[in-house]
Amino acid sequence: MAPTFTHEFKNQSYTGKTSFGTGVYIDGQFRDGSNGTTIDVVNPTNGSLITKIAEAMAADVNTAVKAAQKALDTTWGLNTSGAERGELIGKLARLMERDQDELSAIEALDNGKTFGWAKGVDIAFSIQTIKYFAGWADKITGQTIETDEKKLVYTRHEPLGVVGQIIPWNFPLLMFAWKIAPALATGNAIVIKTHGDASGSWEKVELGLGSVFDALFASAEA
C-alpha cells in the first residue's frame, strides 16, 4: 500500500487540510510501483520537497491496461448507457466544484501558479469542461440515411477501447479534464500518465473518480 500525503494549508487564500495517496492508481487503489522507486515532487517556488510519488514502470502500465480492459468488458463502455455515463461524469464535476478551493491550493503548491489563477482558470475550466461532456454522453447517436429500397446505410458509434492519455506539467488538471471527459463520455476506458513534477491535483481527483465509479463496479462484481 502506497503512503498517503497530508498537507496543512494556512494562508490568506485557503486554510485547510488535504490528503491523498501517492502511489500508482490502478483498479480503485493506490499501489506502490512494481520496482519501488519514487519521483520527487518539488515546490517550484522555493525548491523544497513536497512529497514523493510512486514511479510507474512498464509492468504497472500493463496492469493498468488490463484493469481498464476488464472494466470496459464488464462494466463500462457498451455495458453502460449514455445517460448513466453522463450522470457519473457530472457527479465528478460536482465533487470538484465542492472541493475547488482545496484543488486550487494543491495546484498552486506543486505547479507554482497563484491560487487565484488556479481557481479562476485551471479549476473553473476543468469543471466546465467535464460538465459539458457529461451533457453529451447521451446525445451521441448514429445516423440512418435513405438510399433506395435495396440498401440500408447507417452509422453506429462505439467506444474505441482503452485510451492512453499523457498529461503535461503546465495545466495538469485542465488537460486532464480535456482528455478524460470526452473519452469517458463516449464509453472508453482510460489509462493516464501524469507529469511527475505536477501531479498533486490529479492524485486528489483520482479519489473523486474512485468514489464516483466504485458503486458501478461493485454492482457488476456482486
Image: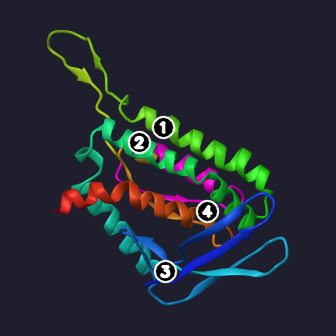
The residue type indicated by label 1 comes to Phe
SS class, disc 4: helix
Total marks drawn? 4
Residue 161 in the image: state x and y as whole percent: 34, 52
Disc 4 versus disc 3: distance between alpha carbons? 21 Å
Disc 2 versus disc 4: distance between alpha carbons? 21 Å
Residue 132 in the image: state x and y as whole percent: 52, 35
Residue 184 in the image: state x and y as whole percent: 41, 47
Which mark is nearer the camera, 3 or 1?
1
Disc 2 versus disc 1: distance between alpha carbons? 6 Å
Q: Mark 3 points at which residue?
A: 57
Q: Name the residue under label 4.
A: 201
SS class, disc 2: helix
- Image quarter of the C terminus: bottom left
Which mark is nearer the camera, 4 or 1?
4
Q: Are marks 2 and 4 in contact (CB under 8 Å)?
A: no
Q: Name the residue under label 1.
A: 133
Q: What's the residue at 80%, 71% (across, down)?
A: 44
